Image (cartoon, rainbow, N blue to C red):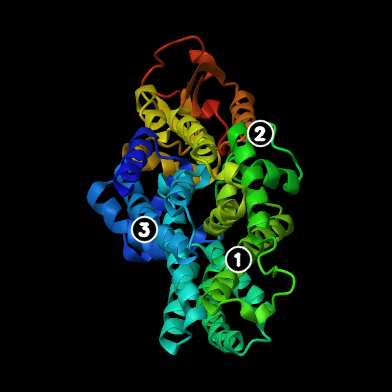
Amino acid sequence: MIAAYALLLLIGVLMLPLRIEELLHLLAARQSSFAGFLNWLPKAPGSAPLSNLLQAPFILVLGVSRLGARLPSLLFGLGNCYLFLRLAKSVRLRQPYMALAVFLLLPTQYWAATQGLPFEQALFLLLLATLIFLQLIRTPTVKLAAWYAAALTLCLYTERLSFLPSIGYLLFLFAFVNRSHERRVIWFLLPATAAPVLLFVPYYLWARPLVSAIWLSAPLPPGTPSSIYLQALLDFAGDSFEAYVLSVLLVVGLFAGVWGLFRVTPGTPPLRIPPTELTRKIAIFCLFGGALSTVSVVLVLDIWNGYPFHSSQVLWAMPAIVTLTFVALDRAPEIYKRPLSWAVMILLCLIPDARYCITPTEDLRSEAALVSPELYGDSCVVFVSERLSRNLFLLFDPDLRTKECGNFFHHRIVLASHAYVTPFQQEDAESFFRGLDFKEFKRIRSGGGQIVVMVGPSETGSATPPASPPAAASFPSTPPTPR
């Protein structure tokens, strides 16, 4: 399964162009000095440095390439294959390999494993922490508690939201505080869960005032509902029709897995439950708490900050959700346990995955390659949408640095816009130059963005503007600066 999954990941890694989110992440490794690397880390909202530190050697060796940026995610994705199987066997699922197949092919999980972002690394650390947690509730020791705290600390320093399931694990364990063994476990878990937060506070206090106010974020797809709850309902496990059906099945499976978990046959004393079975049920109940706390906190944070919901925010709940779904299927009537049931779920995952691999996305590399051929004669380039756009284009064509507009005395202006430039920003830039009596000469759409060539009044309609600029007296002494 690991070999087959590696092949599927390679298809996505090598087929899909690097997205702007990935480029912004790897820009840290492209800084000219270690001080520049450290200064870049806190620019992203919600940043954590561990994934940048791990990705940097791959970028330095393999360059700004699809494999160089995504190889860490691919390797951690394969590691997650093993760790989730351990999780499925820890709670004694009857079909652990079917659960593993569904988990690996989930649209959200497959997307994370084929992107040069910190999600798979954080998920690996979360699965490791979850396995330690399950061992800790069986045999609480100081050593296990220390390993659990270390894993959660690494989660926070890789992706902050990956820490959220541990909150639910601890809170839902309090439901069994009347039992002496669980009380002992809680005393071990309390410091092990609180210590990572305290260890993350110094980085948070240092990074918070350094967050960039002009950080780029992906625009919402057309037709996205304004309600955060509808966004969560429609985007829980992807953004296609099949993913919507899968989302409903997973949500139902999450609650069905915990429904009747501690129900005892009438007339049978609760103490008759074998200790190993009781520990298993407590583990499943705590996994349910981890999934519930993750989704709840994400929704609260999105509402508080005004952010849109994205399925990657609840990736950390997916191991528990898939596990509980298969716990529910283990108790379902025999008709639901047939291979056809597993095949339906896997098919609902494969269709969005295939669509994701073949759907055109932003391709800044191909767009940047089209800018230089337009810069001939008396011309210069303007990177639309603030300074980060400049960094992105220079990543693929450093020579554009010498051709950037220092003034607007040129006869030919090339506006370079990437896929995250909004229609308002594009119109604002074009209207500014139209106000300086420039006319649109050419518009090239590529890689989700566009390149607009605008020429001055004396060159409108001419394919080759003259090499020498006109007298400076014909222009204002201090031209305005476009936004």
Q: Which residue of the protein is positioned furthest toward the left in this rendering?
A: 61
Q: Secondary structure at mark 3?
A: helix
Res 64 seen here: no
Q: Nearer the viewer, residue 221 or 132?
A: 132
Q: Position of residue 445 (x, y in %)?
A: 49, 22
Q: Nearer the viewer, residue 182 or 14?
A: 182
Mark nearer the N terminus (2 vs 1): 1
Q: Position of residue 469 (x, y in %)?
A: 42, 24
Residue that carries the numbered disc 1 in the rendered image: 290
Q: Secondary structure at mark 1?
A: helix
Mark nearer the N terminus (1 vs 3): 3
Q: Position of residue 73 (x, y in %)?
A: 38, 52
Q: Secondary structure at mark 2?
A: helix
Decide if residue 243 is on the left or right side of residue 449: right
Q: Are marks 3 and 2 in contact (CB under 8 Å)?
A: no
Q: Nearer the viewer, residue 134 or 152?
A: 134
Q: CA separation, marks 2 and 1?
A: 41 Å
- Residue that appears at 50% across and 65% down: 91
Residue that carries the numbered disc 3 in the rendered image: 82
Residue that carries the numbered disc 2 in the rendered image: 424
Three-letter amino acid code at disc 1? Gly
Three-letter amino acid code at disc 2? Phe
Q: Are marks 1 and 3 in contact (CB under 8 Å)?
A: no
